[in-house]
C-alpha cells in the first residue's frame, strides 16, 4: 500500500474515529464502551494489513462501516454464557459462594471455618492442572477469559468449559458438607 494511500486512510480514521466508535456502541448497547473502541481499532489494523493491495477500496467509508457491522455480528456470535459461582447449579444446588458465607456452618466457630477453608483449598488443589489454573486465575486473581485466552493460546470456549468442570468437581468434593 502506498504511503499516500496509508496517509489518506489514517486521516479518515483520525477524522471519523468518534463517529465510528459511536456507530459501534449503538450496535452493541449492552456491551462496555471499550468494546466499541476495540472493534474500531481491529478494523483499522485489518485495513492497514490488507494482504490484497492490488484491489483498491473504492468507497472507504462504506467499506469501514460494513466491516464494523460484520465485526459486531462476529462478537455477538462469539459470546458465550459464563459460569457463575453466585448461581445455583442445574439441580438447585447451593451456590459455591453461599457455601462460603452460609451461616449454617456456624461461622462463629473458628475451628469449623478453618476446616471449611482447608476443605475448599483441598478440593481446588485436587483438580487437574488445566482446571485449577483457569479456576484460580478467574476467581482468585480476577483475570478475564479473554486475557487468559490470549496469554495461553486457548479458545475462550475451552476456558469456560474448564471452569464449569472445575466448579462442578469442587461442588461434588464439598457435597458432604450440605448434609
Image: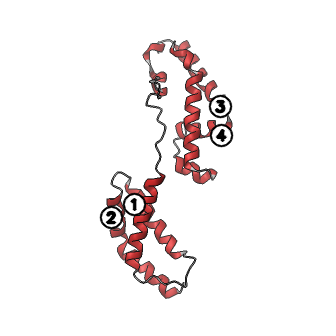
Where disc 4 sits, the SS reads helix
Residue 48, placed above or below residue 26: below
Residue 25 in which image quadrant: bottom left
Where disc 3 sits, the SS reads loop
Specify few, some or many for label 2: CA neighbours under 10 Å numbering under 14, 14-19, or 20 or more: some
> Label 2 belongs to which residue?
22
> Label 3 belongs to which residue?
127
Where disc 2 sits, the SS reads helix
Precedes in sequence: disc 2 or disc 3: 2
Precedes in sequence: disc 4 or disc 1: 1
Residue 164 in which image quadrant: top right
Q: CA distance from mark 4 to mark 2?
A: 39 Å
**Side of 117 where 128 appears, left or right:** right
Q: Residue at x 33, y 69 (%)?
A: 19
Q: Which mark is residue 36?
A: 1
> Label 4 belongs to which residue?
130
Amino acid at each position: 500500500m502506498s504511503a499516500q494511500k496509508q496517509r489518506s486512510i489514517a486521516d479518515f480514521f483520525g477524522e471519523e474515529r468518534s463517529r465510528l466508535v459511536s456507530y459501534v456502541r449503538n450496535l452493541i448497547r449492552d456491551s462496555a464502551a471499550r468494546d466499541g473502541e476495540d472493534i474500531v481499532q481491529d478494523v483499522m489494523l485489518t485495513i492497514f494489513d490488507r494482504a490484497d493491495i492490488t484491489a483498491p477500496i473504492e468507497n472507504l467509508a462504506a467499506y469501514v462501516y460494513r466491516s464494523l457491522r460484520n465485526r459486531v455480528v462476529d462478537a455477538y456470535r462469539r459470546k458465550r454464557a459464563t459460569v457463575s459461582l453466585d448461581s445455583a447449579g442445574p439441580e438447585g444446588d447451593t451456590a459455591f459462594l453461599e457455601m462460603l458465607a452460609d451461616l449454617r456452618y456456624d461461622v462463629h466457630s473458628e475451628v469449623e471455618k478453618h476446616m471449611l477453608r482447608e476443605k475448599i483449598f483441598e478440593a481446588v488443589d485436587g483438580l487437574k492442572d488445566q482446571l485449577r489454573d483457569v479456576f484460580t486465575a478467574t476467581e482468585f486473581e480476577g483475570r478475564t477469559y479473554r486475557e487468559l485466552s490470549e496469554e495461553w493460546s486457548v479458545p475462550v470456549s475451552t476456558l469456560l468449559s474448564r471452569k464449569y468442570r472445575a466448579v462442578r468437581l469442587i461442588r461434588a468434593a464439598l457435597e458432604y458438607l450440605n448434609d
